[in-house]
Amino acid sequence: MNTAPENMDSLSRIVALTFGHMENGGQYWCYVAVKPSRYDEFQKAMHSKAYNIQRFPDDGYGEVIVSGEGITPPSEVTRQVANLFNIPLKEFFKDIDPKKTIIDKLQYVGKASLNE
C-alpha cells in the first residue's frame, strides 16, 4: 500500500485544537482537520503566533471543523468532534505521533481488505 503524504491527504486528517486571539482582543478555540502532508508546516505557523486561522482553508491546510469564543471548547463540542472522527474520547488528547498513527491505520486497513 502506498502511504505517501499525498495519498494520506485523500484518506485522512489530523484533528487539532488551536487557540488564538481575535481582532477584538478576545480569545478563541478552533478544531481543525489538517492534511497530514501540511501538518508540520501548520504547526510552525501556529507556533509563530502570527498565523490568522481565518486563512486556514485558503492556505490549503485542510478544513475548519468548529470554532468559538473563549479559552476552551465546551465538553459537548469536544465529544461531538471525537464522535465525528470516530476517535474514542479517552484517546482524543493522547500525546501521539499523528503521521505514524495514520500510516499504521492505513496499513491495517490495506491488510484487512486484502484478506477479504
Image (spheres, rainbow, N blue to C red):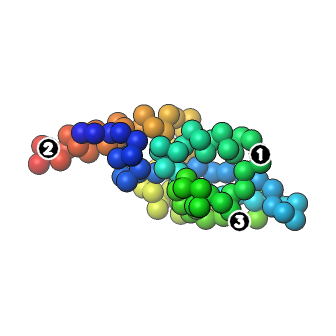
At a point 50% along the width and 34% down the height, the residue shown is: 97
Badge 2 vs badge 3, beta-carbon distance below 8 Å? no
At a point 23% along the width and 43% down the height, the residue shown is: 110
Badge 1 vs badge 3, beta-carbon distance below 8 Å? no
Disc 3 secondary structure class:
strand
Q: Mark 3 is on which residue type?
A: Gly
Relative to 25, 13 lies left or right: left
* Alpha carbon distance from label 1 to label 3: 18 Å
| Residue furthest out toward the front | 59
Crowd rating for badge 2 (residues with CA inside 10 Å; few <14, some 14–19, many 20+) = few
Q: Mark 2 is on which residue type?
A: Leu
* Alpha carbon distance from label 2 to label 3: 43 Å
Q: Earlier in the sequence, mark 1 or mark 3?
A: 1
Quadrant in the rendering for residue 65: bottom right
Relative to 39, 11 lies left or right: left
Q: Position of residue 115 (x, y in %)?
A: 12, 43
At a point 67% along the width and 44% down the height, the residue shown is: 45
Please say whether residue 87 is visible from this viewpoint.
no
Q: Which residue is mark 1?
A: 49
Q: Which residue is mark 3?
A: 68
Crowd rating for badge 1 (residues with CA inside 10 Å; few <14, some 14–19, many 20+) = few
Closer to us: mark 1 or mark 3?
A: 1
Q: Position of residue 40 (x, y in %)?
A: 57, 38
Q: Which residue is mark 2?
A: 114
Residue nearest the viewer, comparing 31 with 84:
31
Q: Mark 1 is on which residue type?
A: Lys
Disc 2 secondary structure class:
helix
Q: Earlier in the sequence, mark 1 or mark 2?
A: 1
Relative to 9, 55 lies left or right: right
Relative to 12, 23 lies left or right: right
